[in-house]
Image (cartoon, rainbow, N blue to C red):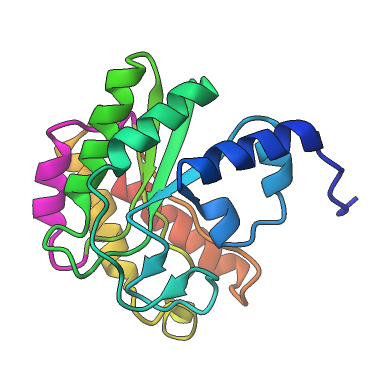
């Protein structure tokens, strides 16, 4: 039951070619997701903006870490054109952590959202953002220029495992971001997620779920 079914290779290769021709980065490829062929065959992909080098080093993640390149100011329009060509009705945009930027990359997110809507006004856009350490308020104020339809940020794991799995991140910082976003944008769907199978207990899962839920009230 755990075996991955062979996908439609023709459609999968078409999507891969389209993504690579536009020099786009997907979390599907960077994280070595085993399901990416299946998603590509359905014409779906999660785009990863602001490069393929992260300023943090988390043990669970395969994305490269180090000093990122400067932002590609042409990326928003390039991304919008590719999404329009794929005829997507719903798109998910995520990114590497960019602690080197004054706003954590929030302005670049907004520029991508604006460009995507310019090419396809009816599309729904979901973002999955970093925690915006040291610049949460600034980042959220920037998002008010052009907010997404869904704002997501993952807490990754339970508090006890943060130091060993993602030492550069902070559980309470993630909760703070979710709380402030819901307070500032009460009519926008705010969501979160976490990984399982890393040594957490059932009680810890319930605790995190409860704290996440309270963040959205």
Q: Where are the magenta residues, as a range?
A: 133-149
Q: Give how far across and how far down residue 59 sits, in percent.
A: 51, 79
Q: On the rendered structure, is 13 left or right of 154? A: right
User: Residue 88: in sight, yes or no?
Assistant: no
Q: Residue at x 36, y 42 (%)?
A: 127
User: Residue 140, image x and y in percent?
Assistant: 15, 46
Which quadrant of the structure image shows residue 208? bottom left
Tell me: 108 left or right of 126: left
**Which residue is at 43% across, 54% downward?**
210
Q: Residue at x 32, y 15 (%)?
A: 121
Q: Is residue 55 above or below residue 39?
A: below
Q: Residue 52: in sight, yes or no?
A: yes
Q: Residue 193: where, in percent of width, then height? A: 48, 53
In percent of width and height, residue 41 lies at 71, 34
Q: Quadrant of the C terminus?
A: top left
Between residue 18 and residue 88, name the one nearer to us.
18
In this orientation, which residue lies closer to the viewer: 148 or 198?
Answer: 148
Q: How many discs appear?
A: 0
Q: Farthest front residue?
A: 21
Residue 31 lies, with reference to residue 57, above or below; the image says above
Q: Nearer the viewer, residue 32 or 130?
A: 32
41 sits to left or right of 87: right
Is 77 colored magenta in this rendering? no
Residue with the most extreme top position:
122
Is 128 drawn above or below residue 158 in the view shown? above
Which one is in front, 205 or 53? 53
């Amino acid at each position: 039951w755990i075996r991955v079914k062979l996908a439609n290779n023709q459609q999968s290769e078409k999507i891969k070619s389209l993504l690579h021709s536009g020099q786009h980065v997907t979390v599907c490829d960077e994280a070595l997701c085993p399901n990416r062929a299946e998603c590509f065959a359905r014409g779906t992909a999660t785009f990863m903006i602001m490069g393929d080098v992260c300023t943090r080093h988390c043990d669970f993640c395969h994305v490269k870490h180090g000093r990122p390149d400067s932002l590609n100011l042409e990326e928003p329009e390039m991304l919008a054109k590719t999404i329009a060509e794929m005829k997507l009705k719903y798109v998910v945009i995520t990114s590497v952590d960019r602690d080197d930027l004054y706003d954590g990359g929030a302005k670049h997110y907004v520029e991508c959202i604006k460009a995507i809507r310019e090419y396809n006004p009816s599309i729904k856009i979901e973002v999955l953002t970093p925690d915006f350490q040291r610049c949460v308020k600034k980042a959220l104020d920037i998002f008010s220029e052009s907010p997404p339809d869904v704002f997501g940020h993952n807490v990754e794991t339970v508090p006890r495992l943060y130091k060993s799995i993602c030492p550069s991140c902070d559980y309470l910082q993630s909760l703070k971001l979710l709380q402030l976003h819901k307070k500032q944008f009460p009519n926008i769907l705010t969501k979160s997620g976490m990984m399982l199978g890393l040594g957490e207990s059932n009680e810890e899962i319930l605790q995190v779920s409860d704290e996440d839920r309270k963040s959205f009230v």
